[in-house]
Structures are given as C-alpha cells and as structure tokens.
Image (cartoon, helix red, strand yellow):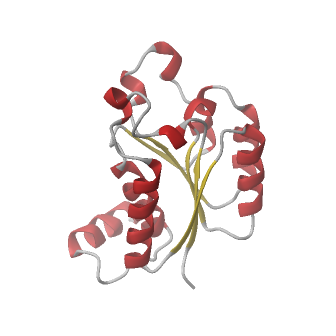
Amino acid sequence: MAAKIMILNGPNLNFLGIREPHIYGRTTLKQIEDSCQALADQLGVSISFHQTNMEGELVNLIQSAHGKADAIIMNPAAYSFTSIALIDALKIFEGIKIEVHISNIHARDELHRHSITSSACTSVICGLGPYGYLAAILAAVQRLGQLPETIPQALHGLAAAATA
C-alpha cells in the first residue's frame, strides 16, 4: 500500500516569496506544493498539502491524520515557538513526524531559535530552504521502507545504513 503523507504549513507561509525573501527566499508555497507533488508522484506515495494561519486548524489536521496517514511533515512556522497544543496533538499521532523549517532557526534571533514543537517530532530539517520539504518526503518514505527501486542506489545505501 502506498504511503500517505500529510504536509502541514502554519501561519504566514501563504506569503512565501513575498515575506522576508532575505530569510525565506522567493519560492512560493504553491511552488513548494507542486515540487512535493511531483516527488510524491515519482515515489508512488500520496500527499495532502495544507496551510492555515489558525492553530486550532493545525491541531484538527494533525488529529485527522490519526489512523489515516503514515507520516506528517509540518512547518509549524511561528507556532514552533509557542504551541503546547501542537505538541500535544503531535504526541497523539503514532506515525513519523518531521518538522521542517526553511531557514536555519538555530542561526536566527533568540525569538526564532528554539522550536518547542520539535520535542514531539521524529526528526527536524532546517536551513535547506524549500528543498527541506523534499528531503522530508524522502526521509519519511525511507523510514517507512518504501523507497522505490527507481531511486538512485546511493540513497538506498544510506537508507540501509540508517536502519542498521
């Protein structure tokens, strides 16, 4: 059965490409979604892609993934630094949870440096720009043991080493 991955995006990410391009670049959220869909198609997995500015909607989406998705990839954006509700919702989800940040939050100002939501995640990817979403999809599919044979052998070698 093909893996099901839910990709969640928090507040203000709908303004990627416009908002602080010196930090987040000029790539739009729609371009990220299109790239994620193209990779998902190539890997034979299904994704659903969501963005909301509302914390409660993110909680509802995480809860809706219970029993229906194999992995959640989430860029909680500002809620990374404030949301106990997201932490609690993520703890309920038993699948793979990968937090993504476009910028390297560890190199940012004190306000944007420490993600509390990462404590409830399987792993964190930050500082890779929009490519972080693609890396997260590959990582989730690898962790689920569903990397297709069409993926370059070098990635399969890393996948085998990572699970050994």
* Residue at the top extreme, as displayed: 110
x then y, percent, for residue 26: 33, 40
Say which quarter of the image contains residue 44: bottom left
Say which quarter of the image contains residue 41: bottom left
Residue nearest the viewer, comparing 107 with 52: 52
x then y, percent, for residue 132: 38, 49
Q: How many labels does the image show?
A: 0
Q: Residue at x 75, y 47 (%)?
A: 57
Q: Residue at x 55, y 75 (%)?
A: 3
Q: Can the viewer see residue 147?
A: no
Left or right for 61, reference 126: right
Left or right for 140, reference 130: right
x then y, percent, for residue 130: 37, 47
Say which quarter of the image contains residue 37: bottom left
x then y, percent, for residue 28: 41, 47
Residue nearest the viewer, comparing 11 with 89: 11
Residue 3, placed above or below residue 60: below
